[in-house]
Amino acid sequence: MSGTRFPMKLDPWWRALLLLGGATQSNSYLEIEHEALTVRFGMLYQDTLQIQDIESVEKADWPFWMGIGWRLGFGQRFGLIGSYDGVVEMRLREPLRVWRVANFTRLAVSLEDPVAFAGALNAKIGVP
């Protein structure tokens, strides 16, 4: 059974750069299925988070100076960014390890429809 898929937003002018990490429109998405959230951004990142481990999701800004692509940021922030528009940030209850290098508790992603994703995820985690 397939879940609800939310495509990541990849601006046309960044697609060549993102292709270096294998990110295309077809393999860059978030998918809510049952009690899990699959996060995939090209060939360099795929993970499945348990819905119960997500504390909140809300609209966020991603500063230009933090860049595009797979980004480790300050304050345990990890970004999967294909556009500076449509960014949401999820706060996690416990730190997760990325690439065996760093822990993060905040995951930012750029989405085609951030409002629909936030609504669907908030409904799953019980936030009005």
Image (cartoon, grey):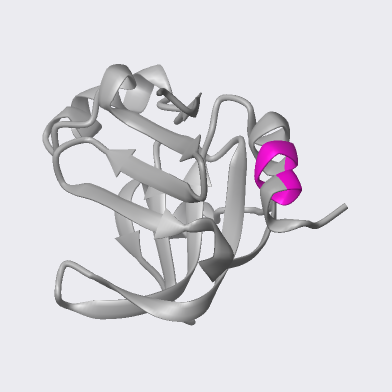
Q: Is residue 57 left or right of residue 111?
A: right
Q: Is residue 26 left or right of residue 94?
A: left
Which image quarter is the N terminus in?
Answer: top left
- Residue 51 point in image, percent of width and height: 54, 57
93 lies above or below 25 = below
Residue extending furthest front?
1
Q: Quadrant of residue 121?
A: top right
Residue at coordinates 41% horizontally, 80% vertically from top-left?
Answer: 95
Residue 78 highlighted magenta (yes or no): no
Residue at coordinates 31% horizontally, 40% vertically from top-left?
Answer: 40
Q: Is residue 112 left or right of residue 15?
A: right
117 lies above or below 16 = below
4 lies above or below 124 = above
Residue at coordinates 59% horizontally, 57% vertically from top-left?
Answer: 89
Residue at coordinates 29% horizontally, 39% vertically from top-left?
Answer: 41
Residue 122 highlighted magenta (yes or no): yes
User: Which residues are the magenta region?
Assistant: 119-123
2 lies above or below 87 = above
Q: Is residue 123 left or right of residue 2?
A: right
